[in-house]
Image (cartoon, rainbow, N blue to C red):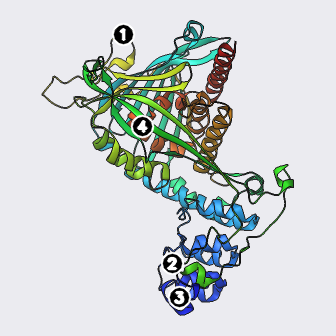
């Protein structure tokens, strides 16, 4: 091992000029040097200048770096965000500064990308499909109350329509009706309609994109004191789906010695059956910023430190072994991993293309979401060829969620609805087209609503969604911690809490981008369309039902 002095002060100050000034908190020189240096340079420990400034608690340097456009969304070498590192310092001013800049960056990037997103969606081919989703169980009492529905989906240009019949759950009975949800996207305006066919009422919300973009300013993203206080008095939780070890294996059929690759016909399409293994839900929790009092819901201020007295020579020398030491507070970290597996039916004969039609949407969404960025890499590099005509995911010991896609570009005639107006093209002729009348509510219905202008001050739907997703998965892992099996089914509460919280709480300005992208991510997220569009009260009842069902199965096996 080389001596720490092998890397002289002159060497690392020339190689990492911004990092050196940040280490010394010489923010005046940093202001000048930043003009000619790479503000996103990564040091040997995996930190940008902004990450280093936050970890050291140098607030003045953080202000300078943020003012000059340092990327607040980047993760460090250990996959922690700038905001998470800011929270670990326990400094409310640091958290407020980073949170405000992050919210502004995400809001402006998301809104600015909507026109391009709509353009990509508009260029993709029209289609009609039916998506049947259902819970299945081998227990008779459970199977009788398991919900199911068939969603009918039309897409034409930047317009989308989803019809559903499942509305809610009450007294162990599912409430059904007729609802249509219509999204229409234009260059500078989007519109979302909820059509109640029983009451003949149409609720409409319109969103002026240009007006919203003008209103997104740094001042408008000032976080509330309560939000900062909440972050400082709760653990830092980082939950993600780890797909690096995921494996798609061909399922086999037959008896030993005569086994062959399993294929099945699903809705007229020959499909290869794959088992999906090694999908890990990883939850990392940090609590070093919490004192014993803070863990009891009280607040106490603390600053970042360099407790192990690491010198600059040691830190910037990539060959020097820190032996587990690091700058900032000593990390108190717990890691839990939950594994689950599923089954996938992939058809290469399917008229819809997962990669060609979905990848452009994912690329645009990845600008503001690391989840979409990882998903894009996953689909491009690891996903089997074809389109997923059927998906089955284990939710609990006796429950499965099953999604099946059918009637592609062939409008159903089961019900005499206005939604049946489609133009079908014979095979081998002009591409399939959807009649524009599909996206119009009946003229005799009562119309309500109008333009909606959302208040962006103190509101960041992206941040809120991420927190809810982290919480939902965190809670589900806690609930299932008593299970001894190494490979467990994905807990039911993960699925339902994700649908209840993450999918429903988006503001109208994100409905267009998120809604359309989720529709096109048919292989992984189509089940969430229904719950995303239902009213919040209805989804809460669905969530309550799932909790009841989960408790029932636990007691069933316990007895």
First-in-chain label (3 vs 2): 3
Q: What residue did someone put label 2 on?
A: 319
Circle count: 4
Q: Quadrant of residue 5?
A: bottom right
First-in-chain label (2 vs 4): 4
First-in-chain label (4 vs 3): 3
User: In front of the other: label 2 or label 1?
Assistant: 2
Q: Residue sitting at 69 percent across and 16 percent down?
A: 558
Q: What residue did someone put label 3 on?
A: 6
Q: CA distance from mark 3 to mark 2?
A: 9 Å
Determine crowd level at label 4: few under 14, some 14-19, many 20+ residues with C-alpha closer than 10 A.
Answer: many
Of residues 86 and 363, the one nearer the viewer is 86
Are the residues at dot 4 and dot 3 in contact (C-beta closer than 8 Å)? no
Q: What residue did someone put label 1 on?
A: 414
Q: What residue did someone put label 4 on?
A: 184
Q: Quadrant of residue 263?
A: top left
Does residue 296 sit above or below 498 in this rendering? below
Q: Is residue 178 visible?
A: no
């Amino acid at each position: 091992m080389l001596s720490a002095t092998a890397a002289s002060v002159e060497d690392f100050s020339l190689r990492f000029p911004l990092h050196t000034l940040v280490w010394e908190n010489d923010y005046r020189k940093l202001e000048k040097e930043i003009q000619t240096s790479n503000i996103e340079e990564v040091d040997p420990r995996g930190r940008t200048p902004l990450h280093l400034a936050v970890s050291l608690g140098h607030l003045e340097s953080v202000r300078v770096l943020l003012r000059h456009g340092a990327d607040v969304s980047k993760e460090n070498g250990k996959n922690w965000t700038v905001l998470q590192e800011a929270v670990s310092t326990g400094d409310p001013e640091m958290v407020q500064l980073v949170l405000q800049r992050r919210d502004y960056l995400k809001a402006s990037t998301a809104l600015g990308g909507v026109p391009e997103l709509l353009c990509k969606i508009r260029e993709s081919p029209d289609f009609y499909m039916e998506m049947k989703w259902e819970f299945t169980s081998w227990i008779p009492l459970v199977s009788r109350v398991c919900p199911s529905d068939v969603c009918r989906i039309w897409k034409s240009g930047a317009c989308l329509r989803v019809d559903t019949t499942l509305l809610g759950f009450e007294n162990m009975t599912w409430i059904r009706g007729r609802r249509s949800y219509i999204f229409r996207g234009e260059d500078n305006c989007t519109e979302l309609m909820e059509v109640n066919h029983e009451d003949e009422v149409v609720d409409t919300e319109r969103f002026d994109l240009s007006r919203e973009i003008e209103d997104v300013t740094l001042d408008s993203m000032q976080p509330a004191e309560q939000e900062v206080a909440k972050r400082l008095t709760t653990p830092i939780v980082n939950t993600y789906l780890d797909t690096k070890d995921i494996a798609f294996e061909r399922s086999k059929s037959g008896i030993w010695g005569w086994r062959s690759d399993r294929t099945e016909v699903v809705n007229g399409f020959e499909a290869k059956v794959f088992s999906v293994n090694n999908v890990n839900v990883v939850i990392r929790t940090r609590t070093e910023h919490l004192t014993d009092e803070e863990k009891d819901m009280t607040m106490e201020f603390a600053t970042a430190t360099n407790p192990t007295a690491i010198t600059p020579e040691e830190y910037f020398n990539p060959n020097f072994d820190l032996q587990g030491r690091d700058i900032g507070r000593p990390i108190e970290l717990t890691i839990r991993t939950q594994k689950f597996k599923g089954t996938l039916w992939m058809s290469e004969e399917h008229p819809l293309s997962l990669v060609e039609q979905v990848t452009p949407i994912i690329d645009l969404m990845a600008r503001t979401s690391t989840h979409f960025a990882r998903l894009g890499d996953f689909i491009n590099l690891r996903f089997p060829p074809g389109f997923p005509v059927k998906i089955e995911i284990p939710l609990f010991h006796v429950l499965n969620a099953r999604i099946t896609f059918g009637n592609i570009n062939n409008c159903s005639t089961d019900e005499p609805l206005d939604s049946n107006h489609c133009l079908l093209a014979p095979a081998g002729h002009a591409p399939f087209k959807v009649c524009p009348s599909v996206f119009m509510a009946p003229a005799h219905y009562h119309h309500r609503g109008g333009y909606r202008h959302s208040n962006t001050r103190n509101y960041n739907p992206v941040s809120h969604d991420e927190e809810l997703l982290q919480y939902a998965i965190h809670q589900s892992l806690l609930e299932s911690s008593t299970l001894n099996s190494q490979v467990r089914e994905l807990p039911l509460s993960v699925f339902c809490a994700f649908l209840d919280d993450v999918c429903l709480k988006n503001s109208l300005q994100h409905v267009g981008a998120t809604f359309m992208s989720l529709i096109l991510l048919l292989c992984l997220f189509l089940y969430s369309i229904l719950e995303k569009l239902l009213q919040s009260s209805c989804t809460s009842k669905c969530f309550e039902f799932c909790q009841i069902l989960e408790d029932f199965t636990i007691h069933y096996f316990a007895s």
